[in-house]
Amino acid sequence: MQKLTYNAIGLMSGTSLDGLDIAFCRFELMPNQKWEWKLENCQTKPYPEAIKSKLSESINLRGLELHQLDVELGKWIGDSVSDFIAANKLEVDFIASHGHTVFHMPENQLTLQIGNPNFIHAITDHPVISDFRTLDVAKGGQGAPLVPIGDELLFSEYDFCINLGGIANLSYDTHEKKRLAYDICACNILLNSLAKLKGLEYDDKGLIAKSGKIIKSLLAEWDSFSFLKKDFPKSLGIELIEPEILTKIDTNKYKVEDMLATAVEHIASQISKVLISAKTGGKVLLTGGGAFNDFLIERLQSKLDENYEIVVADHKTVNYKEALIFAFLGVLNVRNEWNTLASVTGGHSNSISGQKLGDI
């Protein structure tokens, strides 16, 4: 007989390089077959500067250097999680690790997440589930997004779930009750790159962007990004964002605050377009670091009518929803249940994704 309750740690390392999100989560399957969940203990651990620097350049590393970084990151994650478990005196069934994406090229059936799980397993002495993307890519899918199954089973009260992370993505049920999800556009990758030109990690509440003016020519360039014209299923990686979005940043031509204002307008415009094309209204849950950008939320709301209710999740869920859902993907894996939806990724069938290390 399968367990009905699980204590799991989810790990998420995002493209915005904010740090490692660690979330200790409890899940319980209720008699009505709905899942209840709770984010118990959470922490975002900043990367050591040496590792952060290497991660920012990881796409350009040679094979041996990349393998060394994979091991170095795995050891650091293992030590970080081991300290987290000890500090909070946790009883943990398993650890589910997304890893840090170096490149994601599903059209070539390539995806790579580093942070070697063998070292996480060896250091923590806990079972580890990792590599959640490769099986779907092998089945012809995008290997992304993976969060929608969690949106469907844990956040069913919302019509849309939007994560404003390094990349903005959307998840929703169609009128035919089919789950769809896809990446929309660059989000914090772009905003944070611009904020760094001001010596900041991010534009707090979007105040700098709010002080700027929209640059129409730059907005037109960003809005013509080739990825935006693709049909879903589709997923977005830094290898597309760098040449078509980030290379348009030019401090010789534009003020940083004006570029930030333009970036916010671009992101809000692209998100509103996909919402309007999907359904004529609904309850929209926002999570991810961009949910703290008040100006971005303001611009998004201005582009939607009163039929759309925007809800910013509570602080803990905003920050740790992705880590929560990767822990949940681990639960589904352990239960031998689908955790990757072909309707979302374009794979030829659903998958039970993730490789296990240790007995669970």
Image: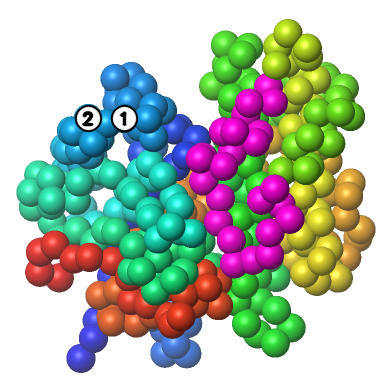
- For this rendering, which residue is in front, 138 or 12? 138
Q: What span is in magenta?
A: 226-249
Classify residue 327 by image quadrant: bottom left
Q: Which residue is denoted by mark 1 in the rendering? A: 61
Residue shown at 70% from the left, 87% from the top: 176
Q: Secondary structure at mark 2?
A: helix
Q: CA distance from mark 1 to mark 2?
A: 6 Å
**Percent position of residue 287, x then y:** 59, 50
Residue shown at 13% from the left, 51% from the top: 118
- Residue at the extreme right: 305
Q: Is residue 105 magenta?
A: no
- For this rendering, which residue is in front, 318 or 88? 318
- Residue at the extreme top: 252
**Percent position of residue 266, x then y:** 78, 39
Q: Is residue 232 visible?
A: yes
Residue shown at 88% from the left, 55% from the top: 304
Quadrant of the rendering where the C terminus is positioned: bottom left
- Residue at the extreme front: 108
- For this rendering, which residue is in front, 267 or 301? 267
Quadrant of the rendering where the N terminus is positioned: bottom left
Q: Amino acid at mark 1?
A: Leu
**Percent position of residue 7, x then y:** 27, 64
* Image mark for residue 65: 2
Image label count: 2
Q: Secondary structure at mark 1?
A: loop
Q: Amino acid at mark 2?
A: Glu
Up the image or down, 80 lies above or below 202; here it is below
